[in-house]
Image (cartoon, helix red, strand yellow):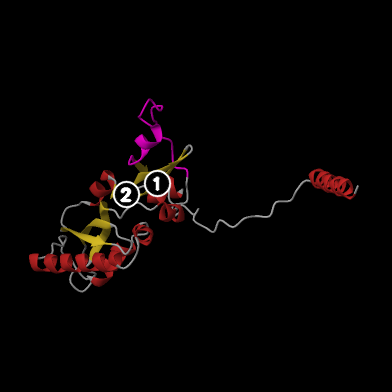
Amino acid sequence: APSMFSVRNCGKTLITRTQGTKIATEELKGRILEVNLADLNNDEDQASKKIRLCVEEVQGRNCLTDFHGMELTRDKICSMIQKFQSLIEAHVDVKTTDGFTVRMFVIAFTKKRPDQVKTACYAQSAQIRKIRKKMTDIMTAEAGKVPLRELVKKLIPESIGKEIEKQTQGIFPLKNTMVRKVKILKKPKFDITKLMELHGDGGDDAGVEMLRPEGEEAGNTLAAEVAAAAAEE
């Protein structure tokens, strides 16, 4: 898994052996893996999100993956839907600074005002339209000015949902505002260097001075002395 997650080795996948022209490593490329965010970050509180990873490169027995999407689990969505409230959804296509085109879906629910006595808290159609406009504007602004890696970091703590709740407070108070789903529509041309940077292996390949064993160094010195003596004779 990419370095934005705590657990790098997230599981195993099966593959048939290389036979003739069908090379096993090539068959693995493009495979989509679905992993729960709780397993990727060792945090049970994040169990309501599923992360999709795409295998981009194979090195030995390790598959290097990249982010391919995110989705809320069905039981989380079902637990938020209740009576006497309005459900508001919006979606938008955004291009990140590193060339990925993503489609983001957001979901929100209305809640009672602090001084409200009535049980129901339904929003009017005009208010829903205004809230939806705010949602698309915030998602475009938040995702359009960062690379995909930073966008994923925003999705995990639901900072986009909190920003939507904050800015729509004047129209109608919202609760449980979450990015419900993220889909990757278009990717830039594959670059192994960027993938290695994403996995934390893209540092400088500076050489390290090797210390020779004492015996080997002594042997080389002796051989040089013998050669010099032979040349003098």
Q: Name the residue under label 1.
A: 65
Residue occupying image coordinates x 32% and y 53%? 189
> Residue 138's spot in the image, x, y percent?
25, 68
- Closer to the camera, 12 or 47? 12
Q: Do the residues labelled 1 and 2 touch (CB within 8 Å)?
A: yes
Q: What secondary structure predominates along the stretch shown in magenta?
A: loop
Three-letter residue code for mark 1:
Thr
Q: How many marks on residues?
A: 2
> Residue 218's spot in the image, x, y percent?
84, 46
Residue occupying image coordinates x 25% and y 49%? 77
Dot 2 crowding, Cα within 10 Å, few <14, some 14–19, many 20+: some
Left or right: where 172 falls relative to 41: left
Q: Can residue 151 be found in the magenta stretch?
A: no
The span shown in magenta is: 9-32
Rounded to the nearest angstrom, the CA distance separating label 1 from label 2 is: 9 Å
Three-letter residue code for mark 2:
His
